[in-house]
Amino acid sequence: MSEYPTALQPERLMDHMRVLCKDIGPRPPTSEQERRAADYVEETLRRSGITDIRRQPFKSQRTGGWFTISSLLLGLLATVSAVAGGRWGAALSIPLFIASVYIFYQFLLMRPTPLNRVIARWPSQNVIATVPAGGQAEQTIYLVGHLDSQKQRFQFPPSLSGIMKAQTSLPIVVGALGGLVALVDLLLGYRGLSRWLWPLGLAYLWGLAGMVYDETQPHVEGANDNATAVSLLLGIGQALKDHPLQHTDVVLLFTGCEEAGCVGMENYLRAFSPP
């Protein structure tokens, strides 16, 4: 190309941003606004001349808080059981601590858990567009942006990266420590050892209060997270339609429910299994 593509000029990209952030506004996962964003993306791509467009429907939970809050509640229940339940309480607390750690760890890795089958009840969608190579395709590039926007969270992302590491590590460390103490108490008969787990309960309460507070906050317009990516992909799609790469297919993937746990991406990978 001899000149900068018109579709990637800042003014054109800002037009997309205004539609997504102002005309449509906040786009919670599984919401009507998220669906309108998907409609806008599909209409814009078709006006650009791209014809290979698919809509992939799927079901999702509405927020990642389902996992974090469930994990912390299980940890709190395990602590109460270990502290107040005697030997049987210590025995019950061990699987509860394990479940708490498992759910939180899987959420950090954006992997599904058995909990998904219960809470994934609301409809969402991915929009998938392919711009074929001008000649013989030898490779494929995937460009990804998500349609939904996040809540106005105060715990994520924190201002200091060290705080985020502590926040995401604490439920795992605390749960593993609690389970270990309860197991030692149960197997070696250290009577009353589990009673000293009460500080873990305070840690779980602190985390739970913060997570619940974040869940009460409104959704934001999502300019940087992630209307910028959606706008850029729309511009790139039009530029590539006018000037396709000679030996590279380009897949433009607009995913839904990223903020609920990368649910759109998980469903895309499961359905299409790209190499």
Image (cartoon, grey):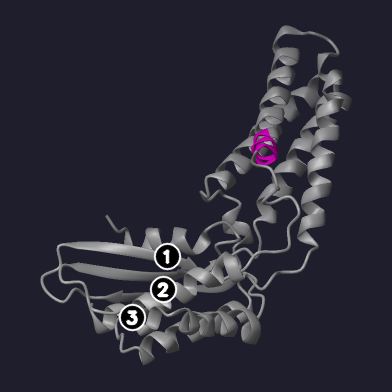
**Towards the viewer: 54 or 74:** 54
Judged from the image, the secondary structure of the residue bearing numbered disc 3 is loop
Q: Is residue 32 left or right of residue 262?
A: right
Crowding near the residue tagged with mark 1, few <14, some 14–19, many ≥20 C-alpha atoms within 10 Å: some
Residue at 35 percent across and 88 percent down: it is 48
Q: Earlier in the sequence, mark 1 or mark 3?
A: 3
**Towards the viewer: 232 or 9:** 9
What's the amino acid at mark 3? Pro
Q: Quadrant of the N terminus?
A: bottom left
Q: Position of residue 42 (x, y in %)?
A: 43, 84
Crowding near the residue tagged with mark 3, few <14, some 14–19, many ≥20 C-alpha atoms within 10 Å: some
Tell me which corner region of the image, top left, top right, bottom left or bottom right, holds residue 26: bottom right
Q: Earlier in the sequence, mark 3 or mark 2?
A: 3
The residue beneath circle 3 is 5
Mark 1 vs mark 3: give the one in front: 3
Q: Is residue 60 magenta?
A: no
Asked if one can make out residue 147 in the rendered structure from this viewpoint, the answer is no
The residue beneath circle 1 is 144
Please tell me whether residue 14 is drawn above or below residue 90 in the rendered image: below
Residue at 27 percent across and 76 percent down: it is 131
